[in-house]
Image: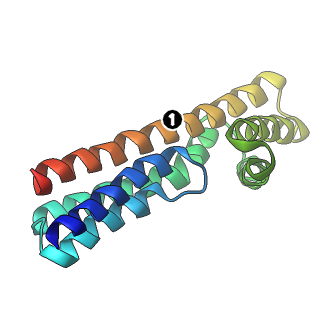
Amino acid sequence: MVELVAVLAVALLVLGVVGSVVPLVPGAVLSLSGVYVYWWATGDPGTLALAAFTLIGFLVMIVDYFAGTISAKAGGASWLATALASVVGVGTLFFTGPLGALVGVAVTVFLVEAYRGKSRSAGAKAALYATVGMLGSTFMQVVLTTAMLLSFVLVVVI
């Protein structure tokens, strides 16, 4: 029975890594689910390791939800541009996929900043920051969920 639970937990952790790359799939939630399923069934990992996994999982969620916004703001984008870009990004994701969402976010930030009277270079900088933030967010999600998977295997399975 423990072996079956371990396989399920590792499968959820692997899906968490995949979910970090696939839009709208909650990679962190899947990864944490794997850890908690195993913990609930076996009592392992211990409290300290469980807390560390939980902390990493929440860090992945924060990166997922806020990195793009923080990057856009760092590039000089307004809250209006950031909010509209988020809506456009999700909308274009359904019709054009991840590349379309990146382009949609960049174009939206640029156009909103231009409408607000900012220079082309300021709008381009904000759009670039937003786009790089989205890409960086995905990269960090993959790194962190992979770290959770490998750590879980080292701590629990081996």
The correct choice, above or below, for 157 with respect to 72 in the image is: below
Which quadrant is the N terminus positioned in? bottom left
Q: Residue drawn at (42%, 41%), measured in percent from left and top? A: 142
Farthest residue to the top: give it.
121
Q: Nearer the viewer, residue 92 or 87?
A: 92
How far across and down, in percent of the image, does residue 124 sit?
Answer: 75, 26
Q: Secondary structure at mark 1?
A: helix
How far across and down, in percent of the image, does residue 100 sit?
Answer: 76, 38
68 sits left or right of 85 in the view: left
Q: Which residue is mark 1?
A: 136
Q: Residue drawn at (78%, 30%), measured in percent from left and top? A: 123
Q: How many discs appear?
A: 1
How far across and down, in percent of the image, does residue 15 sit?
Answer: 42, 54
Q: Residue drawn at (46%, 47%), measured in percent from left and top? A: 18
Amino acid carrying label 1: it is Gly
How far across and down, in percent of the image, does residue 10 sit?
Answer: 28, 56
Quadrant of the image occupied by residue 11: bottom left
**What colour-coding does the image apply?**
rainbow
16 sits left or right of 35 in the view: right
The correct choice, above or below, for 41 with respect to 78 in the image is: below
53 sits left or right of 66 in the view: left
Q: Residues within 10 Å of mark 1 (few under 14, many from 20)?
A: some
Q: Nearer the viewer, residue 48 or 30?
A: 30
Q: Residue drawn at (43%, 45%), measured in percent from left and top? A: 141
Quadrant of the image occupied by residue 46: bottom left
The correct choice, above or below, for 114 with respect to 83 in the image is: above
